[in-house]
Image (cartoon, rainbow, N blue to C red):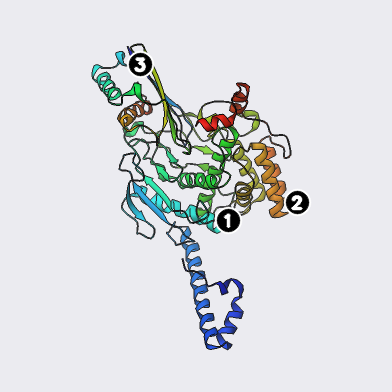
Amino acid sequence: MKRILFERTGGLTGRKVSLDLDLDQLPPDQARTLSLLLEQADFFNLPADLVPPSARDAFIYTLTLEAEMQVHTIRFGDTTAPNALRPLLEDLSQRARARRV
Amino acid sequence: MVQQPSIYCILPPHLLREIAQRGTPLQRERALQTIQAAEQVRARRRLARELAGLMAAVPGGGKQRFVYDAREGTTLPGALIRKEGDPPVSDAAVNEAYDGSGVTYDLFYEAYGRNSLDNNGLDLKSTVHYEKGYDNAFWDGQQMVYGDGDEDLPASERLFNRFTIALDIIGHELTHGVTQFEANLAYWDQAGALNESFSDVYGSLVKQYQRRQTAQQADWIIGEGLLTANVKGVGLRSMKQPGSAYDDPILGKDPQPGHMKDYVTTVEDNGGVHINSGIPNRAFYVTAMEIGGFAWEKTGLIWYKTLTNKLTDRSTFQEAANLTFEAAGELFGKNSLEQNAVKTGWAEVGITIGSQAPTGCLTSLLAYLGLTTQARGQSK
């Protein structure tokens, strides 16, 4: 089982959006894409705290992955998101905004 | 901008005219040059006033704008599209960022004599088209960044338009720069909510200044035009009636309180910095209405003096109330209409001038847990 918890807080509006995705429950092609994006980002080896100190109104993201006895949570801001994570971030942000799940 | 000869600062125009007629050849030449330069300055100021309503790009005291395009990426600042003095381009977001930062510069320069964010002519850099589907704008510590809203979603699902569309949002982001160079208010709890409130205050004042609206005429809405027609709301926040800007099935209800009795205790949003800012926002609104006229002139000046000379990074609402009261006394006299207006403004939101400052939620919680806010600040 693989589960992604995504939360976006802060921003100019202060509005929180979040997602709780069970990859087993998603259409297989979507689950494959997300798994691939996580793999490409080398998620379990990303540093846990990457919140930028001086940004104002920027989003703060909290992303947790639960998979095969491993759990890892990372926090980062718009300007400190690891580049390898950007495609996944874009995908999750769009899902959260569109409330498609 | 034309540099005024120093003689212009000392001698009144009638004396200069005397010298131009009766002085030695060298004195006459200098006096004539000075009169011409002063006339140019006056002409430029006249022009600036006339064009302010059109958000025209008028050279001010060191105004230097640069607008970049991130082309839906996240690399900052991106490709330079328009710099100071360049004509408008075909991209509306670029022009809005350019014009909006210009009006913001003009307000701070004309009303408070401030030369850019650092009062030393700092370049005003803006990046538009940040990321794809980025429904936000932010100040990264050095520049403004604007997203295009929900442009990547089907039209029927979009909540936000592009973020440069609202002039007060541009003013809001730039004011984060001013605050950073002045009181440098922390970004959590009450200091953070004050940081947010100062950005809303001058964001709104930039809009009022551009529209030449009095406090009575202004709508005191932050982010007008930012929400799409799909949303039931008029903007992001209301300084006049915090909590009334939107009430929508998707977006939810505007969570801002307008009184201390409704102060929101939360650990989200850095202790609710975008939520509890409704309280000092309303205090400013009430004060401005009590004083009347153009809010940027007197009320804006009181708040400006407080931000630049009195507040510190950990200031609370109570301290802000006491210090705006003190600033009003220094500017307009003790027991003046203006100072009493400040007192009324804070009283309306449940804060009595001179009372003891309470601590914020996160501060109390962290103190309870044996973790000081100092430790938290260092960990960030």
Q: Is residue B177 left or right of residue B365?
A: left
- Dot 2 surroundings within 10 Å: few (below 14), some, or many (20 or more)? some
Residue B269 x, y percent position in the rendering:
51, 30
Q: Is residue B135 visible?
A: yes
Amino acid type of the residue tagged 1 in the rendering: Tyr
SS at circle 1:
helix
Does residue B29 sit above or below B240 in this rendering? below
Residue at figure coordinates x 54%, y 36% from the top left: B187
Q: Position of residue B89 (x, y in %)?
A: 32, 54
Please name the residue shown 66% across and 36% down the image.
Answer: B349
Q: Quadrant of residue A93?
A: top left
Q: Nearer the viewer, residue B148 or A75?
A: A75
Q: Position of residue B205 (x, y in %)?
A: 54, 49
Q: Chain of mark 3?
A: A
For numbered disc 3, what is the local secondary structure? Answer: strand
Amino acid at dot 3: Arg
Q: Which residue of the protein is positioned furthest toward the left in this rendering?
A: A29
Residue B147's x, y, as percent? Answer: 38, 40
Q: Report whether mark 2 lies on the same chain as mark 1.
A: yes
Q: Is residue B175 left or right of residue B93?
A: right
* Depicted B372 relative to depicted B112: above or below: above
- What is the secondary structure assignment of the residue under circle 2? loop
| Residue at mark 2: chain | B
Q: In the rendered image, which residue does mark 1 sit on? A: B112
Tell me the CA gap for discs 1 and 3.
Answer: 53 Å
Q: Earlier in the sequence, mark 2 or mark 1?
A: 1
Of tags 2 and 3, the one toward the viewer is 3
- Say which residue label 3 marks: A3
Q: Residues within 10 Å of mark 3 (few under 14, many from 20)?
A: some
Which residue corresponds to mark 2? B334
Looking at the image, residue B352 sits to the left or right of residue B160; the answer is right
Tell me how far mark 2 sits from mark 1, CA to CA: 21 Å
